[in-house]
Each structure stands twice: as structure tokens, then as C-alpha cells.
Amino acid sequence: MVIDPNARRTDGESVRIAKDVLCAGAQTKICLPDGPEEVERALARRGARRPVLVGDDRALLRMVELLHRRRELADAALSVVPVGGSATVALAHSLGVPTDAVAAARTVLDGTARPRDLLVDESGGVVLGGLGIPSGFAPYGAHDGGPGGDRGTAAGPDGTAGTDGHGPGPHGDGARGRDCGCDPCVHDRRRAEDGEDGRDGTGPPGHDRDGPDGAGDGHRPWWSPAARTARTALTLLSLPMIGLAGGARRPPHPPPQRLRIEADGVLLTDLDRPVERVSVSTAAPGGGLAEVVVHPHAAGGPLRTRARAVTVSGPDFRYHADALIRGPVRSRTWTVLAEAWSLMLPHRP
């Protein structure tokens, strides 16, 4: 069982639950890697053990890409216990994996391995669910992210890193999580050293443990009804007003792009016909075909087809692949590998 460090940091309770269920139901070897290199070493030494990942969508993509690169993806069914916010486990949920820790852990023990197709590009990148062009168009099963390099990046709901515990956030190295249950939590140690309990309502100096006048005795302050009402009103007035001048606005709609799109060598659209967006996804599991949908900028309905290979070329473009944003690139070809990997899923009723 490989426990992603972000899972330990962001939701230690779910990690503990998954570990308890799996250790009670099967012989389990636990790996607590600090980075991708340790994950690769753990997979190389797993022997006949079945790999189980506890983590979010990005950890799942990294593991599948790693096993594909090692030519070991088809050797064993992969199991996942999704841990993270709903946006960061949307891909796993779209693939049919339960997002509840107990249900997901039981699926690891009692589920059924089901083969799935895989989209692979010429650079070795993998797509489990779908991809969308432009990068602001999130495909089915993906969550919003910000632009990034070709290795792929993801961002929080507001477009900034750190809001999902993966990047620099209000606490320096990601959102503060709960005790992971595997090793003493760094944040808990720091709170203990600073004299902060964290369980009796106290907090860092200068926060709620001080009274309204700034002088407190280390306990939660007592607020009168009038003071609570005034505090709530001030909080509401400080929030941005959506749709009003100076408030939060929706991101602008991306402009049409000039792309040449081919499906199995058949030209769907060329550079002289701009497109609003393009989506490519694996069709029925095990079908060996990708479903391609092109929305032209001109009037008319979308173009739909299925193909084994899809090539998109044109001026520099980024694309949203599952939970990552990749690019910019000028050309990319995705090929479907039929039943290239298997995922443990619940029994069908």
C-alpha cells in the first residue's frame, strides 16, 4: 500500500481508516514515500503484491504513468483509495471508484478487476478519462486547474496552487492536515511546542482565544449576541460581490483556436476553420476506440467520431488531460491502447 504524502497531510483520518480496513483484511506492506523516486523503488520491489494507492487523482496518474513506462501496467490490477477534496478525486470518482474511505478500502479487498482502455501520447503521457482543448475546458472527470508546463500542473478552485494541499498555501507547504496516524504529524509537533492545544478551542496567538479587546486568558472568548451579529455583518461586507464592479468575475471565455484535427488519418477540421473546443475520451471500456467531439466556431452542431488515433496540431496550445494541464505543444497524437490496465471496482448489482 503506497500512501501519497499529500493524503497523509490533508486527510489523516481517511488514511487511518483505509490502513485499518486493509490491514485487517489482508497481509499489507505499507510504504510512506516522500517523493516519486521512492514510489518507483517500492513498485520495483513489490514482487507479486498487488499495488494499492491511497491518494488523489494526481497520485493516481503518476502511478499509472510510472507503471506504463516500466511496462508493468498490465501485470496487476491497480487499486485506489481516493483521499482528498471532491475536486481532487473527481477522476477516480468518474472511473467508478467509491470516494468513501471505508467503501474504497473494501473494494480493494472484495472488488472486481475490470479492464480499461488507455490514451497514450508520443511523449509517454497517459490519459485515463478524457482530455479537453483549450486548457480551460475541463474534460469529463477532470477538475479545474491553472496553466502549467508540459509535465502537467494543477491548481485550486481559484486558480492558485496550495488550496488543495498540493502547493504553497497559507501554512507554507500546503493546507494543514490532521495527524496521519503513520508518523507524528509535523504540524501537531509544532503546535505542541508553541503551547497550542488545538482541541479545546484555542488557536494561534492573536486569534479567537483572545477576547475582543485583545487580552485573553487562553480560552475561547465569550461573545454577546450583539457582538456576534456585528461580527457576522462585517464578515459579509468584506466578501467580494459577484457580478458587481470590483468584485469577483468569471474567467473570460477562451477565444476560438485554429487547429488541424485528424482521426485515424481522416481530416475533421483544418486551420482555416476555428474551433471552440475539442474533447477526446476513452469510449466504452475495452472498446479500443476514443470518442472525439469537435465544436466548430461557425454555426452548426459538433462533429463526432470514434478513432484509434487522434492527432491535433496548430499554433501552441495547452490541453486539460484528466487532472493536469499540459503544454504548450504544436502537435500531439493520442493512441488508444485497448484494455491496457485494470482497476479494482465494486461488484455490479
Image: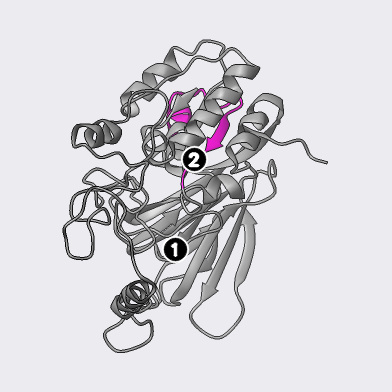
Is any part of residue 67 visible from this angle?
yes
**Residue 106, relative to residue 212: is it above or below?**
above
**Residue 44, relative to residue 258: is it above or below?**
above
Question: What is the residue that sits farthest to the right in this orientation?
Answer: 349
Considering the numbered disc 2 on the image, is that residue within a helix, a strand or a loop? loop
* Residue located 32% across and 76% down the image: 239
Report x, y in % for residue 133.
44, 63
**Residue 4, relative to residue 269: is it above or below?**
above
Is any part of residue 121 visible from this angle?
no
Write down the residue under mark 2: 83
Write down the residue under mark 1: 133
Q: In this image, 93 relative to 319: left or right?
A: right
Circle 2 residues within 10 Å: few <14, some 14–19, many ≥20: many
Which image quadrant is residue 339 in? top right
**Residue 67 within the magenta-colored segment of the rendering:** yes
Residue span colored magenta: 65-84
**Residue 92 within the magenta-colored segment of the rendering:** no
